[in-house]
Amino acid sequence: MIIVTEFTETNDEIDLRSLFGVLRRQIKIIAFTTLACALVALVYLYSVTPKYTASALISIEPNSNIMTDAAAELNNATAMSATVDGEIEILRSNDLIKSLVASQSLALDEEFGVQPSRTMQLRSLLGFEVEAASDPEAAVRSVVNRVREAVSVSRRGRTYLIELSFTSESPEKAAQLVNALAEQYIENQVQNKIESTLVARDIISERVAQAKEDLELAENDVEAFLTDFTAQYVDQSNRPELLALEGQIEERNQTIASLEASLRQTATSIQARDWDALNEQILSDASRGLLQQRDKLNAQLNAGATDEAELDMDALRAELAALDEQIASSAANDLSATRLDISAFRTERDEFEANLRGEVLNADLPPGALTDLYQLQQEGVIARSQYQDLLQRLRQLDSMAELQVADASVVSSAMQPSGASFPNKRLTLALGIVLGLMLGTGLGLLNEFVIGGVVSEDQLADLMRASSAVGVPALSEEKDPNIIAAGVINAPLSGFSESFRQVKHAIESQIARAGVGVEGQGKVILVTSAVPAEGKTTSAVALARTLSMAGNRVVIVDFDLRKPAISERMGVEPNESLLQYLSKELDFEALGKAYGEEKSTGLSYLVGGGRAKVPTDALISSPRAKKVFEVLREGFDYVIIDSAPVLPVVDTLYLAPYVDAVILAVRYASTAQRDAARAHARLAREMPEETVFLPMLTMEEGQRRRAYYYRGYYQGYTESNNS
């Protein structure tokens, strides 16, 4: 059965039936591609090394550090969120990864350690000597990069929890390394806080020393000002009570200076065991008595003794040594007593100075003096306040350096994973199948519309940009082209025969609408194809017989001078008269005797035979060929021309200007779309603009069920009408 599709209106709706038809026709490509992708996925799944992922959960709690004043500032949600994000970046940092590599000796690990390059591996396989890596830093970077690729850090929603994961070929190693990384992170965090605290302490310690110097300078300035001002005021005022206080202060200063000088001399003598010099110092009666005893013992030792008294001499020396110790101890006590005396004199002096300054300050003083004094005192107060603050901060930092705690804690340690995280077998296989379906569908569509042959009338009409397209189904299971060509005679109710009646109607209606040709003369219909074996000769014979059986005067002419085949299709003897006439070997009258007529259909024919000895394009383009067309138009209603294929030879292009309609035969699922389009383009350049063009899809072997359906429908329709 023939389906004629008229493309007179634009249909923007998606034709789902056509789409499913395309998928059905390309089901083998889709199925094989899907199966291939699924097999590739399976091979990948069973060849790739599985990997396991272990995860630990870390909580970020900056407020837990009670030793820092900045904890309250982190109560702000934005600041906390930024802190968590910052800790995530720290967990990904090179320093932390390097610490893990060093602590776990990953540089020697088979999975993450230093690995030879592909060039070295190839040299090793070939038996060449492999040199050690010349760049240790590059080797370390490669290890760090491999470990970093195995580490994954992510935040749990908007919480303060961080999920730390590690992927390895070993489930035990994955759990071990992720826990080690978490511990290393917390340890580094504490160490960094301690180091930053110590750095801050050192900085503040320098500031404390400077603040102390500033305080001493400020106090010295106040003291010097008061001393000078007081002395000046006393001299100027000449008040007896102030002069008396000044005398007391001077007396105490002299006494203190004398005691301090004696103290230094006594300490030097005691240290040097210079008892003679010590005897001249200010000592207590007990110390002087011990010195006198020592002098007596020395006198005895210096006077000498008899041999009988040797033991007494040793006893004297021992007694002298013990006495030296007593003297040193007693002198040390005297030093302590002297220091107490000095302290007492200083206290008295300070009291006298305070009284003197009090009397002076309570007197009527000039305004300038009070202003200078107040300024010096305020500078001293400020210097003291700064010094106290820095000193307090320094002591606080000393305590913090020993009491630092981490701002993070491991709330869930990693456990050994029970299953591989990579590859995901179900997902990989599903992706392989989906990819196969997509790729197969794409290849199917590519084969349907670009690479493969034409498989539908709609597709053919779109390809040729024609107003209509005709499809000719196969004649049952028949393969013999001669029997197929006779199908319109032997099986008039078959789908094959009905298809050519549809072709006849399409040609007649389009010629009538186009108004081609000269009124009263026959119409010339050219049947050709893009390449050989497209069914053009069979179609030309079947169409000619169909037109003749409808009562028309029809002649079919074999203008395929290179490979004539009409005689074989019609079962008649070949004849070289046309070839001889075009070659000027016969005259026109002799050509007229070469015509034959088919008794069953009344079809006239001028068949060919043999091969030309000259280029056939020269024969076809000659005036004799043109005369043949003119005579045939006058004698017949329809002239069917069977010509050579368009792409292999140029003959048909010379015939195109003489015809009223062109039928281009395209074999179902066989002719490449590119070839069909090229053939149409060549014909379009040679045909007159008004020439009717009808593409025809022949031998639709893939549509046999549809052919049977239409044949059965046609037969049933006829029988019901007859009844």
Image (cartoon, grey):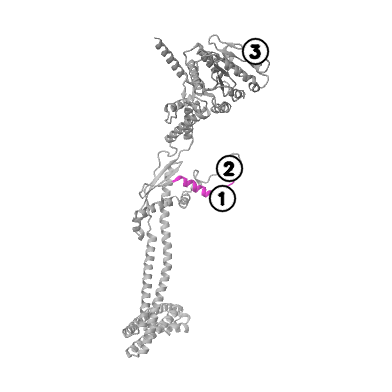
Identify residue type, mark 2: Thr
Query: Label 2: which residue?
Result: 119
Q: Residues in magenta? A: 129-151
Identify residue type, mark 3: Glu
- The label on residue 589 is 3
Identify residue type, mark 1: Asp
19 with respect to 121 (left or right): left
Residue 184 x/y as whole percent:
43, 51
Query: Label 1: which residue?
Result: 135
Residue 380 covered by magenta stretch: no
How crowded is the residue under tag 3: few (<14 C-alpha within 10 Å), some, or many (20+)? Answer: few
Residue 139 covered by magenta stretch: yes
How far apart marks 3 and 2 lie (CA) works out to 86 Å
> Is disc 3 placed on a helix, strand or loop?
helix
How far apart marks 3 and 1 lie (CA) works out to 99 Å
How crowded is the residue under tag 1: few (<14 C-alpha within 10 Å), some, or many (20+)? Answer: few
- Is residue 68 visible in the rendered image? The answer is no
Residue 713: quarter of image:
top left
Q: Residue at x 41, y 11 (%)?
A: 719
Q: Nearer the viewer, residue 464 or 9?
A: 9
Q: Residue at x 41, y 69 (%)?
A: 208
